[in-house]
Amino acid sequence: MSFLLPFLYVSGLSLILLFILVFIISQIWSRRTADLRLVSIQEKIRNAKADGKDFYELGVIFLSKKLYDQAIINFRYALNLWELDDKTGLANLYNTIGFTYTQIAQYDLALFYYEKALLHEPNYLVTLKNIGFIYEKTNNLVKAKDIYLQILKYDVDNKFATDKLNLLTGRLIRDDRI
């Protein structure tokens, strides 16, 4: 009995340390993979072999590192090189640019790019959700509610939009805006 408690303690501590080790190794691996991809893309750019998708991917890497200015620069290069008939890709690119501007609280620019995304994919639910988020952040709750209603027109079972709509309706009733 006297060995049970130390055994459990050491076993528990070993499991915690193992979990931490696995987490650290996975972080190192993902960072290394991103850095290798970064080097590969930069090499393509130096050799003038990069296309819009390469610049997009480079922008996403910078976005993940919270280097927003660098991300935006690369997204703009991607826009200049993107295939104009790739409507879904353009919508995704515009949405990502809008998201980047949202991260730095430049909501007017974010809305501009989100609207561009919707020109290419009018039922792009991620973009609509992002627009709703901006309207909530800027306390434009009526417009946010309209956006979430629009999402429900495209996807009646959208739990996110339903939940947001219920919350906003409650807030609007409390604030006497309805």
Image (cartoon, helix red, strand yellow):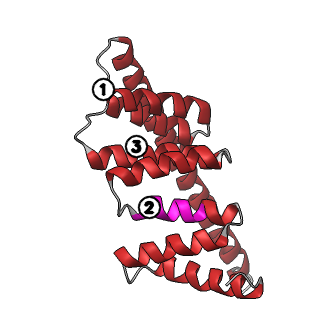
SS state under label 1: loop
Residue indicated by mark 1: 51
- Which quarter of the picture shows residue 152? bottom left
Q: Name the amino acid, label 2.
A: Val
Whether residue 67 can be seen here: no
Q: Residue at x 31, y 33 (%)?
A: 82
| 8 or 119: nearer the viewer | 119
Please rate how many residues cluster around mark 3, counting C-alpha atoms within 10 Å: few if below 14, some from 14 to 19, many from 20.
Answer: many
In the rendered structure, which amino acid carries the disc numbered 1? Answer: Asp
Q: CA distance from mark 2 to mark 3?
A: 12 Å
Residue holding disc 3: 93
Residue 119 place in picture, x, y as percent = 36, 51
Q: Earlier in the sequence, mark 3 or mark 1?
A: 1
Q: Which residue is mark 2?
A: 126
Instruction: Give the image location of residue 52, x and y in percent.
Output: 33, 30
Extent of the magenta region: 125-133
